[in-house]
């Protein structure tokens, strides 16, 4: 199956985890990808994995100037048929521990980043293109230590609904994936013992009884990026093993 023949997709946060799994599959299905990342080792690994069909660039979603660079890359490539706004990061903490610096840093990466990226890249989205936004099941879980992260991911859900309405006249679709516990390096910031405890707590609430794989989460994003979802916009797709039962 070659759903992405002659199509070009830009994936932010695409050098590891779910983003890289999606990039690999797009290439295997005939497409080309532009992916962004920050870690040089992962950038190098992604270049090797994607070969000639992938362009890998260093880009920080929290840097407002980075969006203009992405727009230049997209324009030089000939425009985009898909945009997956996937970059972001999480940090846990009690409500009492939140401060302005922590708030500003996470909002800059997880909310302002996608906003300015879409603004800069909109002119390079071809008619009929698809935009996918990565939220998180944390938005709906009500976790005691995830209030700020959940707020950033909830903001994306709200904005994506407005984006879907605004871009519909150009036949551009906008949808959201809501991953639950996916087996990636996303929680690498936690000490090993804390990470295991956190994952066991969350996975213990998953009806399917396990974490998902990056490939499983990417498969849903790619459905939404492809023409298979040509009549789907303004929607959310939970990829969470039933965790939030949405």
Image (cartoon, grey):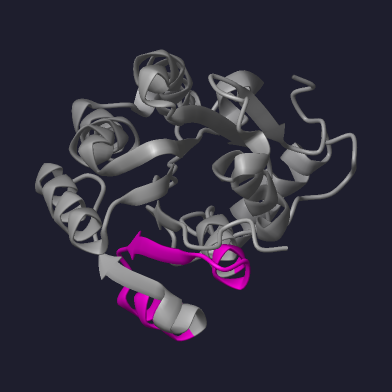
In the rendering, at what x and y percent does residue 243 appear? 78, 30
Camera sees residue 72: yes
Q: How many marks?
A: 0
Name the residue located 67 percent from the left edge and 44 percent from the top edge: 220
Quadrant in the picture for residue 226: top right
Could you tell whether 102 is left or right of 131 in the image?
left
Name the residue located 21 percent from the left edge and 37 percent from the top edge: 123
Could you tell whether 216 is left or right of 82 in the image?
right
Name the residue located 42 percent from the left edge and 25 percent from the top edge: 156
Q: Which residues are magenta?
A: 25-48
Could you tell whether 185 is left or right of 118 in the image?
right
Q: Is residue 38 magenta?
A: yes
Camera sees residue 117: no
Task: Kindly give the residue lying farthest to the right in the view shown.
Answer: 208
Name the residue located 42 percent from the left edge and 48 percent from the top edge: 81
Nearest the eye: 66 or 70: 70
Question: Split into 4 quadrants, where in the image is the N terminus?
Answer: bottom right
In the rendering, at what x and y percent does residue 159 appear? 39, 19
In the rendering, at what x and y percent does residue 94 appear? 46, 27
Nearest the eye: 167 or 61: 167
The relative height of residue 233 versus residue 179 in the rendered view (above or below) is above
């Amino acid at each position: 199956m070659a759903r992405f023949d002659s199509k070009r997709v830009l994936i932010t946060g695409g050098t590891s985890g779910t983003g890289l799994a999606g990039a690999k599959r797009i290439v295997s299905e005939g497409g080309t990808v532009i992916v962004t990342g920050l870690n040089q080792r992962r950038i190098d690994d992604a270049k090797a994995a994607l070969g000639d069909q992938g362009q890998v660039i260093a880009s920080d979603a929290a840097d407002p100037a980075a969006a203009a660079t992405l727009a230049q890359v997209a324009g030089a490539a000939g425009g985009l048929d898909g945009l997956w706004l996937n970059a972001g990061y999480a940090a846990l903490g009690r409500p009492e521990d939140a401060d302005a610096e922590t708030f500003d840093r996470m909002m800059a990466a997880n909310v302002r980043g996608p906003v300015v990226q879409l603004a800069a890249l909109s002119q390079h989205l071809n008619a009929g293109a698809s935009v996918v936004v990565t939220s998180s099941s944390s938005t709906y879980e009500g976790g005691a230590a995830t209030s700020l992260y959940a707020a950033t991911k909830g903001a994306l859900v709200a904005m994506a609904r407005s984006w879907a309405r605004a871009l519909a006249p150009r036949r551009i679709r906008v949808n959201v994936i809501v991953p639950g516990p996916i087996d990636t390096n996303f929680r690498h910031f936690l000490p090993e013992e804390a990470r295991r405890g956190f994952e066991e707590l969350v996975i213990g609430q998953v009806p399917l009884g396990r974490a998902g794989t990056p490939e499983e989460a990417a498969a849903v994003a790619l459905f939404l990026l492809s023409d298979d979802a040509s009549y789907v916009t303004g929607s959310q797709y939970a990829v969470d093993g039933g965790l939030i039962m949405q």
